[in-house]
Amino acid sequence: MTEHAVVIAGGGPTGLMLAAELALAGVDVVIVERRASQDLAGSRAGGLHSRTIEIFDQRGIADRFLSKGQVAQVAGFGHIRLDISDFPTRHNYGLGLWQNHIERILADWVLELRVPIQYGVEVTGFAQDDAGVDVKLSDGRLLRAEYLAGCDGGRSLIRKAAGIEFPGWDATTSSLIAEVEMAEKPELGMRRDAIGIHGIGRVEYEIRDGQVVYKDTGTVRVMVTEPNVGPATQPTLRDLSEALIRIYGTDYGVHSPTWISRFSDTTRQAAAYRDRRVLLAGDAAHVHSPVGGQGLNIGVQDAVNLGWKLAQVVKGISPDGLLDTYHAERHPVAARLLRNTMAQVALLRTDDRTSALHEVMTELLGMHEPRKRFAAMMSGLDIRYDLGEGHPLLGRRMPDLDLVTDDGTRRVFTLLHDARPLLLNFGEPRGLDVTRWRNRVQLIEAECVGAWELPVIGTVTAPTAVLVRPDGYVAWVGDPPQPGLIDALTSWFGPPATP
Ligand SMILES: Cc1cc2nc3c(=O)[nH]c(=O)nc-3n(C[C@H](O)[C@H](O)[C@H](O)COP(=O)(O)OP(=O)(O)OC[C@H]3O[C@@H](n4cnc5c(N)ncnc54)[C@H](O)[C@@H]3O)c2cc1C
């Protein structure tokens, strides 16, 4: 039986990001992926929000995505565009880039980090005991792991086999989505009618002056809302043709589909993100309508929250109770996201009263403060983990400030590339003593250039010292003589080493 510290079921965006985080921490991890390769049928998610770009920047890979996609103001609520260009982040925009490209870039990075990805194999079951998990594979092999991460999507076998409840709401609406060829030139753009909102575009596009401009030729991407929630079966070309005729009066000679699928607004969340040695992340832990384009983003961010914690537990640095903070922090984030997608689905109904409500919301979100709050929510920049009362930075993302250090000017995010915790001391040089965490925590004596400004909150008091977790969230803010620092170091990065 082959042994690994961690087996990840599913090599979608969440599984790939988790694997990379574990590999950066030196953990032996393997991905088991059902698909024969990283190729994805259909382009699926359309891009990245600001916080996800920041997360990639924290690992030094943001440029790989930015160079392949289209930077634009993509945040929105119920199709009401929310501009974040005045936000205090280096990435005050989103990125249009299809999921198949995002996955390919992530997979290349994961392979650089020497994580094996076993394609064409499925996890078919598992049994856990006090010391580990036996993971059954479709080719008859058994893997032994200390932990199993279910990143296996919305129909997660891992979640079901662990007996984790998945409460929520059934679908109220569904849409066919497809990538096809058309013999005739279709009407490109969005269309609203009594059934709902539909759209025809091309996979290849440019964003000019904030507007999507489709290429004249190439694969057509169709999204047609159905009059009633469709069945769970795989839709056919005939279903798509009939749906197009119902809405547009013609199917434009649709043919040669490379992808036909159906999505709905089914909204569910795993009651627990952990069952002893089994953890869930990404769509395996939460499903919702794609409106707002948040699913891939929250999955990547789940992975970054879980990765360093799981690595520390596997390496014996922290007790396994640290893993409970994963559920405690990420479950509320997804619960809030589920709520915002349900609200957006309701807001996008096309009856007259909802259309009136949409106009009112558009007016409201045109105002400075509501726009800021909703934009920060939709772009993932307002997340705050409940780490208690204190400085506004506590539990929030560390801003990517320029620091003057002994090694010259460095950006905070550059110091996070290795996914190691960071203690930044802006006070009395050598005023902090972390000798007993020396091998785990980087202590940087620095001066800060620029204002401490947070999205929505605005300028905050410059702290004397900050402890930043590998995921970029602030675990402690303080002044020497270090009140709470020892506790924070111990609870997040394990007990002190013996001198
Ligand atoms: C039409 C549409 C538009 C979307 N638009 C956006 C958007 O604009 N922005 C956004 O952020 N999100 C969007 N999403 C959501 C996004 O696609 C998902 O949230 C994202 O793919 C979730 O990533 P994941 O890795 O958690 O799961 P998945 O991408 O589902 O990956 C799970 C992986 O696990 C594999 N797998 C499954 N079972 C097993 C098994 N038993 N053993 C081994 N492997 C297994 C699968 O093959 C798959 O590769 C959209 C989704 C749809 C359908």
Image (tube, rainbow, N blue to C red):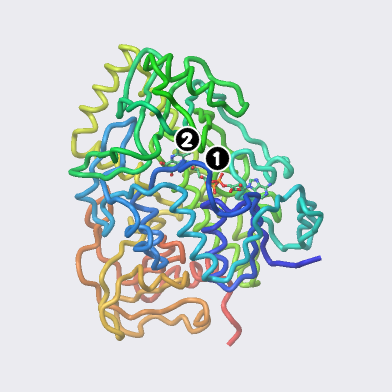
* Res. 340 visible in picture: no
For label 1, count other residues whose C-alpha is less than 10 Å away and answer few (under 14), some (14-19) or many (20+): many
Residue at 54% over, 21% down: 238
* Nearest to the observer: residue 76 or residue 415: 76
Q: Where is residue 200 in the image (x, y as percent from the top left)?
A: 36, 29
Q: Where is residue 71 in the image (x, y as percent from the top left)?
A: 28, 51
Left or right of residue 66: residue 263: right
Mark drawn on residue 286: 1
Left or right of residue 323: residue 160: right
User: Who comes first in sequence, dot 2 or dot 1?
Assistant: 1
For label 2, count other residues whose C-alpha is less than 10 Å away and answer few (under 14), some (14-19) or many (20+): many
Q: Are marks 2 and 1 in contact (CB under 8 Å)?
A: yes
As drawn, which residue projects farthest toward the bottom? 499
Mark drawn on residue 127: none
* Nearest to the observer: residue 378 or residue 225: 225
Quadrant that contains the N terminus? bottom right
As drawn, which residue projects farthest toward the front? 183
Q: Is residue 95 above or below residue 62?
A: above
Q: Is mark 1 within 8 Å of ligand 1?
A: no
Instruction: For marks 2 and 1, give the CA distance.
Output: 8 Å
Q: Splitting the image into 4 quarters, where does residue 416 fall?
A: bottom left
Q: Splitting the image into 4 quarters, where does residue 403 fall?
A: bottom left
Secondary structure type for disc 1: strand
Q: Mark 2 points at which residue?
A: 338
* Res. 381 visible in picture: yes
